[in-house]
């Protein structure tokens, strides 16, 4: 169990943190699905660093600050959210729990935050939107791949607009899938009975395909900035965010192309292995942007203090992928509630203990970095 220096024998403790949730959820899942959700690509370097890279930072707390009215709220996708966390678009949530994205949407709305919808969701955009809105206000980003079939891509955009999605998250890091030993070892195939209404494939179309084959059948590895971004801009008024930016160069490109935001992401370490942890790539993107484009980050965020560190390094807002899948696998909608409450409580406590009363108080001055041979270095 995370947080315990030595294993404690006896009955299982309650789920106290996201690592506990991961362990309990993983124990419930068949091996092929568990590995599909939890693994990264190739040597697992990037997925490992995504979460461990946070450990080199230390928080510089200011004490004796009145934090009795600390406010965790901020803006995301055009509305005020309860705190700066959203659920990244991850496909196949029906494999974690039959309620899939419906349960995720309801839990997000209950907690007052937003959500990304994968093109590979197991429910339609309308079903996901309606489920969330039946609980409370929620805004969605529609995740898009660059598709071989432009008519289908446009159809997805129109569905997203019709349902009131605010933004497109264009996934830019996946011309092809990463080297995924787990999928090949387990011969991972989509389980029977799951539909893909957004890309209009049903189980018959997909069930005998490996993930790699299915992906290649519709995704266009000829995607590029010059072709795809002006086209997107010409067909929709939704915000355009580039998901998967990791460098200053591509941050500048996104600004040049008139994009609304970037999501600093390495796809949860599932694409190219050996690329940096997102928290290590974030500072060069923030510096290059110089305030000219909105910057969010995902990948390896597993606690409220990870969220705090990402904000201190210049992200406006963060997103998490796997924790929602673990919540779903553990206990459906209630599991996602538990996951979101854990992040919220940890984040609020972290702000208060660091002496921050609002999101704008979380700055570079709140962090230091541990070096092997000296005192804490200021950033
Ligand atoms: C099982 C799984 C499915 C995913 N599916 C998609 C997807 O359909 N589209 C996409 O852009 N990203 C997808 N992602 C990546 C997430 O959007 C996100 O970038 C990543 O999970 C963040 O890292 P984290 O899981 O460490 O929080 C997926 C991730 C996982 C684990
Ligand atoms: O596996 C993934 O990382 C991914 O992006 C994806 C794509 C299509 C369906 C499910 C997941």
Image (cartoon, grey):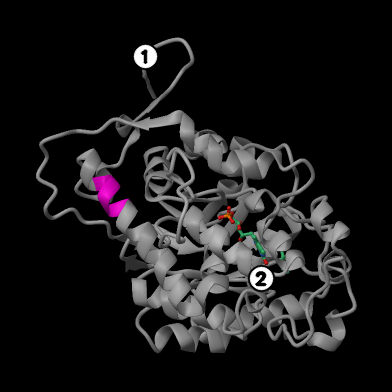
Outermost front residue: 10
Element under label 1? loop
Left or right: 353 as drawn, with respect to 372: left
Measured from the top left, where is residue 361 in percent x and y? 25, 42
Measured from the top left, where is residue 296 in percent x and y? 48, 51
| Snapshot quadrant of residue 25 | bottom right
Precedes in sequence: disc 1 or disc 2:
2
Q: Residue at x 52, y 39 (%)?
A: 279
Q: Which residue is mark 1?
A: 375
- Can residue 350 be found in the magenta stretch? yes
Q: Residue at x 58, y 67 (%)?
A: 325
Q: Which residue is mark 2?
A: 91
Element under label 2? loop
Q: 224 above or below 59?
A: below
Q: Would the CB of label 2 be found within 8 Å of ligand 2? A: yes
Left or right: 203 as drawn, with respect to 347: right
Q: Residue at x 50, y 76 (%)?
A: 331
Badge 2, how many Cα within 10 Å: few under 14, some, many 20+? many
Measured from the top left, where is residue 249 in percent x and y? 63, 37
Q: 366 above or below 98?
A: above
Instruction: Locate ligand 2 by image quadrant.
Output: bottom right
Measured from the top left, where is residue 292 in percent x and y? 45, 45
Part of the protein shown in magenta: 347-351
Q: Nearer the viewer, residue 207 or 283?
A: 207
- Can residue 341 be found in the magenta stretch? no
Q: 14 above or below 349?
A: below
Q: Magenta-highlighted stretch: main secondary structure?
A: helix
State the CA–CA distance, disc 1 to disc 2.
Answer: 44 Å
Outermost top residue: 373
Image quarter of the C terminus:
top left
């Amino acid at each position: 169990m995370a947080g315990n220096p030595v294993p404690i024998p006896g009955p299982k403790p309650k789920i106290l943190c996201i690592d506990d949730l991961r362990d309990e959820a993983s124990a419930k899942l068949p091996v092929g699905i568990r590995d599909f959700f939890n693994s990264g690509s190739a040597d697992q370097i990037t997925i490992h660093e995504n979460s461990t890279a946070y450990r080199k930072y230390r928080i510089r707390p200011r004490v004796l600050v009145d934090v009795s009215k600390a406010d965790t709220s901020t803006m995301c996708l055009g509305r005020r959210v309860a705190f700066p966390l959203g659920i990244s678009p991850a496909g196949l949530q029906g494999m974690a729990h039959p309620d899939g994205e419906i349960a995720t949407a309801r839990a997000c709305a209950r907690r007052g935050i937003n959500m990304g919808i994968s093109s590979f969701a197991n429910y339609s955009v309308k079903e996901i939107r309606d489920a969330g809105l039946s609980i409370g206000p929620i805004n969605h980003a529609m995740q898009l791949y660059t598709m071989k079939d432009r008519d289908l891509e446009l159809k997805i955009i129109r569905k997203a607009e019709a349902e009131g999605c605010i933004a497109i998250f264009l996934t830019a890091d996946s011309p092809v899938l990463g080297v995924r030993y787990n999928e090949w070892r387990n011969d991972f195939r989509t389980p029977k009975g799951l539909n893909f209404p957004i890309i209009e494939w049903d189980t018959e179309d997909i069930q005998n395909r490996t993930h790699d084959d299915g992906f290649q059948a519709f995704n266009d590895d000829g995607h590029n900035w010059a072709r795809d971004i002006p086209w997107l801009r010409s067909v929709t008024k939704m915000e355009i965010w580039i998901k998967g930016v990791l460098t200053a160069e591509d941050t500048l490109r996104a600004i040049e192309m008139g994009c609304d935001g970037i999501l600093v992401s390495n796809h949860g370490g599932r694409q190219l292995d050996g690329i940096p942890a997102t928290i290590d790539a974030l500072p060069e993107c923030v510096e290059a942007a110089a305030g000219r484009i909105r910057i969010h980050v995902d990948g390896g965020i597993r606690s409220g203090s990870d969220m705090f560190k990402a904000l201190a390094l210049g992200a406006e807002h963060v997103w998490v992928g796997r924790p929602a899948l673990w919540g779903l696998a553990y206990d459906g909608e209630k599991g996602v509630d538990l996951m979101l409450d854990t992040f919220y409580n940890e984040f609020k406590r972290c702000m208060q203990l660091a002496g921050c009363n609002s999101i704008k108080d979380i700055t570079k001055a709140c962090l230091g970095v541990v070096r092997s041979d000296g005192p804490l270095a200021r950033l």
